[in-house]
Image (spheres, grey):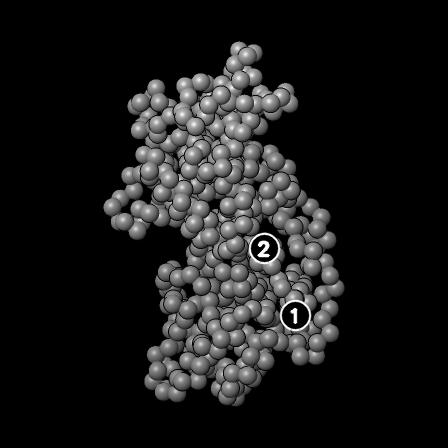
Amino acid sequence: MRQSLRRSCAACAKSKSSCDLRTPRCSRCIKRHVECAYANEPSTGPATPGWQNKASMCPLDGSGTLTNYRFGSLDPFDSYPRTRLPREHVQRLIYSFLHKIAFQYYPLDLNATSNPFLISWWPLALGDPALFHVSLQTACLDEELLAQKGFQNSELLMADSVALLRRKLKYMSLAVQDGTLNSVITLATIEFGKGNAKVGEMHVNGLKKLVDMRGGINAVRQTSPLTARMVSWVSMLIMGHPQFETQDDFGIGDGIPPIPEWQFDSTVLDDQLFDLSNIEVEYAVKNVLSRLRSIFHRVRNMPFQATQLHDLTCFVIHRLLLSAPATTISLPSPITESIRCGVIIYMFIAQGPTYYSHAVILNTIMIRFMENLEHLTSISRVYDSLDVWFAAVGMVASAGTPHHRWFMSRAREIAVALNLENFDVILFHIKSVLWLEKPQSEDLVRSHWDNIFSLTDQAVLSDLSISVSPISSSVEFI
């Protein structure tokens, strides 16, 4: 079919009305429930070389949306908001986002037919110029980081993203859209990743106001689970502490909800589990640990969906951090704080990095964990399964960091004190406290304990003993 200069469908031309050229039917024909026919294929026009060539630009209305943007194209490279980048570059970034970035951001679902960044986020971006620019920016940054030749194009996309967002924020109905929230939290992530922490925090503070305007984080979840998950999780990573409350154990409130399994009976009839009744632990922490043990016990022989684990992880970490003491005037017992930090770290390990690296907040919690374990060591007590679990969690989470030697030294001390001579016995102790059955989990833990058993040279052991502070903040992904 040859290109045509005709600028409307037959119905709009007959009524002399404006046509937005959507395919397969324009919006006016959809509204009037009439047939929409184009005499020839509408002309798409050439790619926009830049802002300077205003004649070739798709005009922006006051809200920052494209007034003649075509929806409905089957080819994702055929129809999208215009940018100041060359067409070929934009198409390369689109390909990168759809085939790489979407799975890096959301490794919980590696299926192209169900990954929410492909089936939810991207269709939204095609109709939202601000979100489209922000999405391209993630792919562009990845490309420029690999090339090591500067960030000219990503800075260009950043400037345009901010300009488009500002236009949307002038209108209440546009400001509270899922696409707006997605754009703001992604910009916050980008700024935080570039080392502009203050700018990232500014974006998060503004985002919280938008969430409040929507009726709270749970209200956002009703229309876009992906948006709610990303906003609550990433805002915590950026700020270093939770930005939203959690619902109670029965799912009441406007905050982050628990998964349905959270409300099941937390009593686990398993005589192989470590008895929590023999230790004095703050109720808020013991309640979380008990419910987690119950959930993990129930899913031992059934699949535990990745999104369920993410929702559980987000809820648990928020709940535990929110219940932590705000001041040092009245600190809970070191056993309570050690369990609190240990469970948080374990949930980070079980889930893995999602949306963005959790290295910074994890490093902060690791230091608190080590400080409380040192305090616990100063108290006269006998090592038990809890100490074995602490050491295992610490070694796995600290792999590749300066903290690792400290945990190896502690693990060796515990192994000697409890006469732990093989991994099967160690695994029994670990599973008696808290354990989620996952592929390769045992092998991962075993690799660290095997290193402990190979450390027989006392000179090596003494070299492993290091002070908790100062500690480097460099932490790799788990």
Disc 1, SS: loop
Q: Is residue 413 visible?
A: yes
For residue 73, above or below residue 444: above
The percent coordinates of residue 61 (x first, y second) are: 47, 21
Q: What residue lies at 47% left-to-right and 82% top-to-bottom? A: 413
The image shows residue 336 at horizontal and vertical percentages of 59, 66
Query: Percent position (x, y) of residue 377?
Result: 51, 76
**Residue kind at label 2, given as amino acid type:** Thr
Residue located beneath label 1 in the image: 301
Instruction: Name which residue type carries label 1.
Output: Asn
Front residue (pair 42, 166): 42
Instruction: Tell which circle, 2 or 1, labels the residue nearer the N-terminal end.
Output: 1
Q: Residue at x 43, y 28 (%)?
A: 1
Q: Front-most of 120 and 401?
A: 120
| Mark 1 residue crowding within 10 angstroms, few (<14) / some (14–19) / many (20+) | few
Q: Quadrant of residue 93?
A: top left
Q: Is residue 345 visible?
A: no
- The quarter of the image holding the C terminus is bottom left
Structural distance between the alpha carbons of marks 2 and 1? 18 Å
Residue 338 vs 91, above or below: the answer is below
The residue furthest left is: 149
Mark 2 secondary-structure assignment: helix
Image check: 140 left or right of 369? Answer: left
- The relative height of residue 428 versus residue 73 in the rendered view (above or below) is below
Quadrant of the image occupied by residue 282: bottom right
Residue 307's disc is 2
Picture residue at 66% right of the left edge, 73% below the top? 276
